[in-house]
Amino acid sequence: MHLLVTGGCGFIGSNFIQHMLAARDDLTIVNLDKLTYAGNRRNLAEVEERHLGRRYHFVHGDICDQELVPDLLARFPFDAVLNFAAESHVDRSINDPFPFITTNVVGTQNLLEAARRAGVPRFVHISTDEVYGTLGPTGQFTEDTPLAPNSPYSASKASSDLLARAYFHTYGMPVIVTRCSNNYGPFQFPEKLIPLVYLKASRGEPIPVYGDGLNVRDWIYVLDHCRGVEAALFRGTPGAIYNFGGDAERTNLDVVRTILHLTGKSEDLITFVTDRPGHDRRYAMAFARSTADLGWRPEVTFEDGMARTLAWYEANGAWLDEVQSGAYRQFMDAWYKTRQA
């Protein structure tokens, strides 16, 4: 089986590639990644060492490229496309929405059209719970919850989801959309909450918390999300949407306190800062459809997942240092040139 994974050098995409190559010996994966600031080839250094040129291939490129993408899909007999490629950080979308519209909307449309023309038999589009907007103190998002995005990021993802829906209904294209809650785990870029708090706590620096810290998120360990996407790929119904949640609602303040406790640091490091614009109050995901149709449910508890995640950060200080300094880009460029020599 041949898979095209876009955005495979990012946090979730790289975990997915590692999981799939380890779990299944009948796969060949082509990873198409633009290598933006969040795309790190070092995330897949072990995969490249073991499988590059055989079960794994890397293509440096943009899903918006109207020549590269159709050519790639025409040249390889892909059985499925899995679209992880996205600009994903809400704060960045508030400061500059344009890259989010370009990648998340235009890029997705380019990928869908190329896959349609190539007759790819399965297309899995990976999205987010943020497209649903915000919840009150009770209730959960279901796959039938109306879309009500509140940030440029979530609006761009909702737009891409609607394009995926349109390609299914207009062209009969076998598209599946998955939506997950907040991911955490190894290889997450340090601008996100959990790695950012870990880094600041380990240095004894003040930890900024937006507003009153009581915004609620449902946290899912990244491996559970990857298993969900795998299940959707092999058992999902074309045209369907599947939610993946971690069954782990926590306030941002709870998450920060958990990390401080696990790292042995004082809560005195917590510093409340002005809330960001349009900050959704609460997310919570119902995933009964994924359980019924795909046989999926989260397996890693929040407590176990946090312990695994912080242990990984502690054991991979060099990775964190290189990501923060930007040295990870030079490292992989030099490593790949050595491999090619």
Image: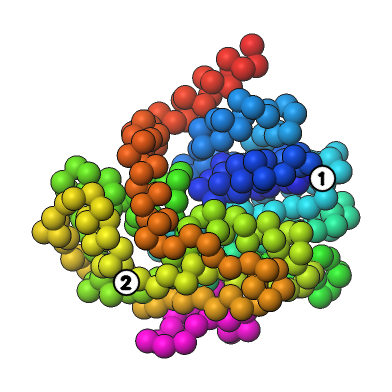
Q: Secondary structure at mark 2?
A: strand
What is the residue that sits farthest to the left in this orientation?
A: 268
Checking the image for residue 261, the label placed there is none
Residue 321 pos. (x, y %): 33, 34
Determine the main secondary structure of the stretch shown in magenta.
Answer: loop
Residue under the image location 63 percent in, 61 percent down:
228
The quadrant of the picture occupied by the N terminus is top right
For disc 1, the neighbor class at 10 Å (few under 14, some 14 to 19, many from 20) is few
Q: Is residue 149 magenta?
A: yes
Q: Position of residue 259 (x, y in %)?
A: 27, 55
Residue hosting label 2: 251
Q: How far from the left and from the top, in percent, is residue 54?
A: 75, 29
Q: Amino acid at mark 1?
A: Met
Look at the image and say whether residue 75 sits in the magenta stretch.
no
**Image height of 281 relative to 24, above or below:** below
Q: How is the image coloured?
A: rainbow
Q: Quadrant of residue 314?
A: top left
- State the CA–CA distance, disc 1 to disc 2: 41 Å
Tag 1 near tag 2, CB within 8 Å: no
User: Toward the viewer: 183 or 98?
Assistant: 183
Q: Earlier in the sequence, mark 1 or mark 2?
A: 1
Q: Quadrant of the C terminus?
A: top right
Label 1 belongs to which residue? 1
Q: Residue 258: where, in percent of width, then height?
A: 27, 60
Residue at the spot x=78%, y=70% of the render? 237
| In the displayed structure image, the side of residue 142 where residue 76 appears, left or right | right
Amino acid on which the number 2 mark rests in the picture: Thr
Answer few, some or many: residues within 10 Å of disc 2's Cα (few below 14, many 20 plus, some between 14 and 19). some
Residue 319 position by quadrant: top left
What residue span does the magenta drawing correspond to?
131-150
